[in-house]
């Protein structure tokens, strides 16, 4: 479970930074890796009951892409990953929106802090 | 009393056996630090316990990721859950919230104190009772105005308010400026680690940092305080008297875990806050510009307005509500600033413990009237920003179109949407209110827990209702008053 969770968070953070911050992972891998580690660490620091809920929801997010795109989230192309992110971001179910909102906030804050 | 030098300060590591103290103070924020210092100076044997680390104020850059990791509880990821969740932060380090906040100082407004007297029967709140405590604390932490001009981002809001004929003021801070200082950055913040904590240690007090207290248990001779040190060691302390000063979330959580629940954790209040990111034509922002100090109080206590920390990472974070416009921040950030509108409401929240989990569950149920007031606040804030030359405004509502002209203000709905509005607060209080109204309060007017012997609260939990201003000045004054009352000096 843990490797799948970490791979999903890593893929999600990369997608968010690439799409929203306009960054391609060439030459800035160190800052990107720092950001991913920060996102994982912040999830671990959350209030414990929320952290557990966030982990479960992240795994649901990862596995659900199997049904739509035939592969786990971290194995998708960037285009498919981003479609999946947008589907959750605009979902009518608030925990789905909250999940994307959480990772988006931490990834963006981390990226611009480490990069500067 | 002989004053100790720094090398003689008693700061403990993980205890190897049971400890004993006359007075145990749990939490070292403004309430706990003042209580501990005054009691130690009066010759009491005091043990001050803090869950976080004992760090210098300069251990990290203010408002940075390092600060979030080192000094914020849960890395700053703490939401009050409800129809519209409110993100809040708590300090978790020696000095508590005073180490991480902007240091803006207010006394409790007279109208608010009168309300507390009327509705909660709080004693000792008249000017003649309480002003001496405000004055003493103001002197101790050097409450003062900026020596030079305020940051441009701050002046923008001030000028916008004046142009609309609204009352705006520079708020003093607990900040010591060198003689002849000309710049706002020529000074040092007078947090608890710079003021009351050294006073406490100099007076012979003992501090135990990095220790989380889990339970209080009353027995025939006093209190047994148990917890865990960061390294895993079990901590057990015998005490005659306990002061709980962990703040508006941690104090009720500790008392509830200890089976003490009369009016505890049922009346949490906070100041829900919305933000608007503004872009101007002129440069208003620069690295290290300092803390904005102006607040607009025309509609206080219902609505207050101010300017937030607006570094590039925080501007980008604010713009995640407007993902199509994120990339323009990199180019335009020197012309951008983040502004806030804060409301005061009677809505209450709760704090609960969750079986098998150590963190407290915080719930806060904003209602439609609150969302309408927030909308009104957002609209007024935008009006001020346009008045002072804003070219574009980005409200903290996911999916809302940016506001380009005053005519676009009609895009702000009369009631902000619950699921899409991003709310935050840094002010939490009222979870264990004080007073003589037995049905509404958890402690008497001086912080003594109503149903327990020798157990006191001295932190923001005691504040009866949302004061509409930064509460640290109030917390300090009531902590001083309550400590002196305990010592029989009032």
Image (cartoon, coloured by chain):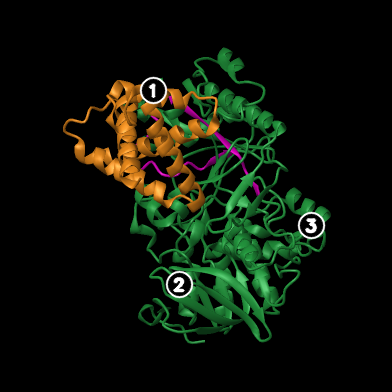
Q: Nearer the viewer, mark 2 or mark 3?
A: 3
Quick one: quadrant of the C terminus of chain B? bottom right
C-beta proximity under 8 Å, tags 2 and 1: no
Report crowding for label 3: few under 14, some 14 to 19, many 20 or more residues within 10 A (C-alpha). many
Q: Which mark is residue A68?
A: 1
> Element at badge 3?
loop
Could you say which chain is coloured green in the image? B
Image: B432 above or below B182: below
B17 sits left or right of B370 in the view: left
Residue B150 visible in the displayed image: no
Q: Residue at x 43, y 29 (%)?
A: B320
Furthest residue to the top? B407
Q: Position of residue A22 (x, y in %)?
A: 29, 25
Report crowding for label 2: few under 14, some 14 to 19, many 20 or more residues within 10 A (C-alpha). some
How many numbered marks does the figure carry?
3
> Element at badge 1?
helix
Residue B294 visible in the displayed image: yes
Q: CA distance from mark 2 to mark 1?
A: 61 Å
Q: Reply yes or no: does residue B293 show up in magenta.
A: yes
Q: CA distance from mark 1 to mark 3?
A: 54 Å
Q: Position of residue B453 (x, y in %)?
A: 72, 77
Reading the image, the residue beneath label 2 is B198
Q: Position of residue B360 (x, y in %)?
A: 57, 55
Q: Which residues are magenta?
A: B269-295
Q: Position of residue B261 (x, y in %)?
A: 71, 63
Could you say which chain is coloured orange in the image? A
Image quadrant of residue A85? top left
Looking at the rendered structure, whether the residues under marks 2 and 3 are on a common chain is answered as yes
């Amino acid at each position: 479970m843990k490797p799948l969770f970490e791979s999903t968070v890593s893929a999600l953070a990369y997608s968010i930074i690439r799409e929203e911050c306009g960054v391609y992972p060439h030459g800035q891998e160190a800052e990107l890796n720092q950001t991913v580690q920060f996102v994982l660490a912040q999830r671990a620091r959350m209030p414990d009951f929320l952290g557990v809920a966030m982990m479960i929801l992240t795994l649901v997010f990862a596995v659900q892409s199997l049904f739509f795109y035939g592969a786990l989230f971290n194995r998708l192309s960037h285009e498919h990953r981003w479609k999946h992110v947008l589907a959750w971001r605009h979902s009518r179910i608030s925990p789905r929106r909250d999940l994307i909102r959480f990772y988006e906030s931490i990834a963006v804050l981390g990226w611009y802090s480490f990069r500067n | 009393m002989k004053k100790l030098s720094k090398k003689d300060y008693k700061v403990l590591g993980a205890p190897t056996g049971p400890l004993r103290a006359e007075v145990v103070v749990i939490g070292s924020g403004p309430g706990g630090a003042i209580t501990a210092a005054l009691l130690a100076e009066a010759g009491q044997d005091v043990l001050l316990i803090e869950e976080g680390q004992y760090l210098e104020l300069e251990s990290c850059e203010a408002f940075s990721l390092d600060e979030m990791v080192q000094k914020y509880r849960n890395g700053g990821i703490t939401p009050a859950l409800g129809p519209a969740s409110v993100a809040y932060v708590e300090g978790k380090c020696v000095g508590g919230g005073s180490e991480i906040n902007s240091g803006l100082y207010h006394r409790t407004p007279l109208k608010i104190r009168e309300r507390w007297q009327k509705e909660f029967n709080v004693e000792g709140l008249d000017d003649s009772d309480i002003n001496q405590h405000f004055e003493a604390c103001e002197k101790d932490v050097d409450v003062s105005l900026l020596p030079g001009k305020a940051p441009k981002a701050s002046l923008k809001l001030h000028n916008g308010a004046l142009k609309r004929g609204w009352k705006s003021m520079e708020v003093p801070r607990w900040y010591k400026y060198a003689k002849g200082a000309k710049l706002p950055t020529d000074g040092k913040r007078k947090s608890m680690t710079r003021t009351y904590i050294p006073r406490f240690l100099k007076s012979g007090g003992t501090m135990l940092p990095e220790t989380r207290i889990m339970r209080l248990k009353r027995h025939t001779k006093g209190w047994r305080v148990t917890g865990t040190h960061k390294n895993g060691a079990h901590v057990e302390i015998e005490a005659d008297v306990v002061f709980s000063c962990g703040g508006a979330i941690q104090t009720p959580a500790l008392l509830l875990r200890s089976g003490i629940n009369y009016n505890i954790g049922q009346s949490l209040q906070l100041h829900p806050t919305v933000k608007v990111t503004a872009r101007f034509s002129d440069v208003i922002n620069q690295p290290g510009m300092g803390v904005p100090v102006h607040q607009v109080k025309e509609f206080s206590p219902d609505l207050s307005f101010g300017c937030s920390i607006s570094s590039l990472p925080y501007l980008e974070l604010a713009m995640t509500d407007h993902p199509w416009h994120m990339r323009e921040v990199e180019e335009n950030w020197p012309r951008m600033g983040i502004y806030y509108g804060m409301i005061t409401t009677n809505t209450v929240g709760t704090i609960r413990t969750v079986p098998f989990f150590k963190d407290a569950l915080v719930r806060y149920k904003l209602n439609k009237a609150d969302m309408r007031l927030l909308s009104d606040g957002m609209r007024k804030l935008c009006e001020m920003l346009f008045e002072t030359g804003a070219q574009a405004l980005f409200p903290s509502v996911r999916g809302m179109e940016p506001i380009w002209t005053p005519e676009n203000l009609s895009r702000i709905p009369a009631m902000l949407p619950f699921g899409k509005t991003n709310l935050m607060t840094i002010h939490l209080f009222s979870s264990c209110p004080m007073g003589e109204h037995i049905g509404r309060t958890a402690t008497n007017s001086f912080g003594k827990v109503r149903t327990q012997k020798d157990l006191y609260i001295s932190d923001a939990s005691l504040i009866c209702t949302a004061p509409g201003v930064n509460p640290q000045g109030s917390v300090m004054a009531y902590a001083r008053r309550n400590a002196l009352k305990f010592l029989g000096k009032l």
